[in-house]
Every structure is written in structure tokens, then in C-alpha cells.
Amino acid sequence: MSSLLAEYLAFLTDNRRMSPHSVRAYYATADRLAGFLQLHWGNDVTRVTLHKISSADMRAFLADRRGDGLTNRSTARELSAARHFLRFALGDDATLPVMKGPRVQRSLPRPVNPDDVLALADDVAENAKDGWIGARDWALLLLLYGSGLRVSEATGLMGDILPLGTTLRVTGKRNKTRIVPLLEQVRTAMQEYLALCPYATSADQPLFRGAQGGPLSPALVRRAVQGARTRLGLSDRTTPHALRHSFATHLLAGGADLRSLQELLGHASLSSTQVYTAVDTAMLLDEYQNAHPRA
């Protein structure tokens, strides 16, 4: 089984359309499934014995994972990753066990008020250990809201995007490249950060640097935002990714076309973007409930 898992890891690694995070998650599921089946069947798991896997075996595996405290959403992801591994191991022509995943209720992202975005970015900057780090955090958080970037996309920007113009070329999930607008205020904030940054900027170096000069970790950005929202009394949903949601929701509320929004967000499917129409409707209903005398 170890050789099969090694082949699978190589397959995932060579598949450049997957992020390193996805590679780790898919491999971990395959490793867990193999370990479970070895105990469940009482014998070694090989590519040959995997052909006998049944729906009952898969239900037992997911029940075991449920015992670890998995939610419906996590269980659905585990099932999807397990199917991916089985498809690799058994081949495209093999019949996989039929099993319906748990129902997952899609939660609506809650946008952050523009004033709260600025307050959040200001608080993060003020509480930074150094002036240039504060300028970096201010610029990065404005970029997330102003251009709708994922935090990993922002921290992954390289010096080859310089000099800054009115747009920015971003590489997102599945190595998909898109063009996003760069507002003048955001561009100014980024230029001020670069002027203060003690590390030289070059095309092959990350644009946003950590304190020691290496790439800025997305985890550090999330931690800084967590501290700021606690100090400001903001919702636990106020995360770096919520700034991307706010970008999308506020554009849609301002009359942006859904297809254009799909391109700006880098969504492969329009269905991923359509969730924001529900967000916008929810905002309208909130306004109605607050304003209508009979509400």
C-alpha cells in the first residue's frame, strides 16, 4: 500500500492545478482510508484488494471519521477526496461504490461594512511591531478589499508585478490568471509600503515580506486580523477572506454584472458567484426589516 500511496502523492504533486494545501488534504484522506480498510478487512490493502471495496465499507469509513467530530461539510469533503483516490487506484473504467454524501447547507458570506474594513486595517497597522510592517499590513488588507483577492493570492504576489498600474495580474486557484483593478488608494498604500520595506524588491522575490525578509505567511495575516477584530468588537466572521466577500457583495449591490464579477473573483463556475445574489437579497431584506414601519 505504501507504494500505491507514494504513486498517488507523486500524481497529486505533478498535477500542478492543485494547491499544496489540496495535495496534503487529498493525500491525508487516502492514507486514512488505507489505514482504516486494513483494520476493517484484517488484511493488507493493495490495488487488487481495493477492487472489492463496497458502499458498506465506505459508510463504515465515514462513520469512523464522524467519530472524530467531522461536520457535514468536512464529511462531504472526505468522501470526495476518498473517491478521487479510488478513481486513481482503480482506473477510470472501474465502478466505484455508490454513496450519497451528507447534505451541506451553504452558508451565506456576511460582508464587512466599508468603515469597518478601514477601521480593521488601521488597527492592524497601528499594532504592528514596526512602521514598515504596519504599512505592509495596511496595504495588504486594502488590497484584499479593493481587488477581491484571496489572502494566499496577495501574499503570493512577486516583485515582477512592478511598476504598479491601474490593474494587477493575479494567479489564483488551479494556476488560473486573471486581471483585477488596482484602485488609486490601494496603489498608493502599496507604494508607501515598498518605500519603507527594508528589503530590496526584485522580480523573483515576494512583494509582501515577513519580518525576517521571507514570504509573508497568510497565517500571520489571519492572526493579526483576529486580534484587531477582538479589540474592535467585530464579528468572528470578520476575517481576511470576508474582505473578498465584501468586495464581491458591494460590487453586486452597486450594479456589477454577474459575469464580470465571476471574472474578477476568478471563479471557474458561475454557480460559485451566484451565491452573492443571495447575499445581496439578504442585505435588502435586512434594510427592509430595519426601515419598514410594519416590519
Image: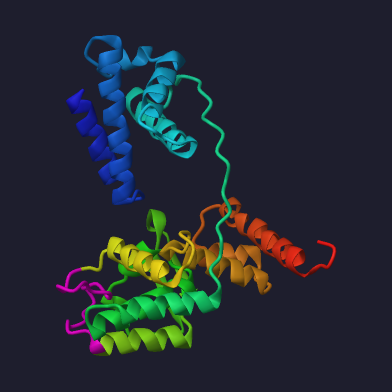
- Give x and y (percent) for residue 114: 54, 76
Residue 67 sits inside the magenta stretch: no
Q: Is residue 46 left or right of residue 90?
A: left
Q: Residue furthest top?
A: 42
Query: In this rendering, would 46 be left or right of 269?
Result: left
Q: How many numbered dots are placed on residues in this image?
A: 0
Q: Residue furthest left?
A: 212
Q: Position of residue 164 (x, y in %)?
A: 37, 84
State the residue at coordinates (18%, 26%).
Answer: 2
Residue 195 can be seen, yes or no: yes
Residue 181 visible (yes or no): no
Identified at 30% across, 78% down, the residue is 127
In the depicted structure, whether residue 162 falls above or below residue 3: below
Front one among 109 and 84: 109
Instruction: Give the quadrant of residue 37.
Output: top left
Q: Main secondary structure of the magenta part?
A: loop
Image point 40% across, 61% down: which residue? 172
Residue in the foreground of this view, choosing between 203 and 217: 217
Q: Position of residue 97 (x, y in %)?
A: 46, 19
Q: Position of residue 9 (x, y in %)?
A: 24, 37
Q: Between residues 177 and 146, which one lies in front from this camera angle?
A: 146
From this view, report whether residue 216 is shown above or below residue 173: below
- Is residue 198 depicted above or below 7 in this figure? below
Magenta residue span: 196-214
Looking at the rendered image, the quarter that the C terminus falls into is bottom right
Q: Quadrant of the N terminus?
A: top left
Residue at image point 58% right, 57% down = 273
Query: With respect to residue 202, does 88 lie above or below?
Result: above
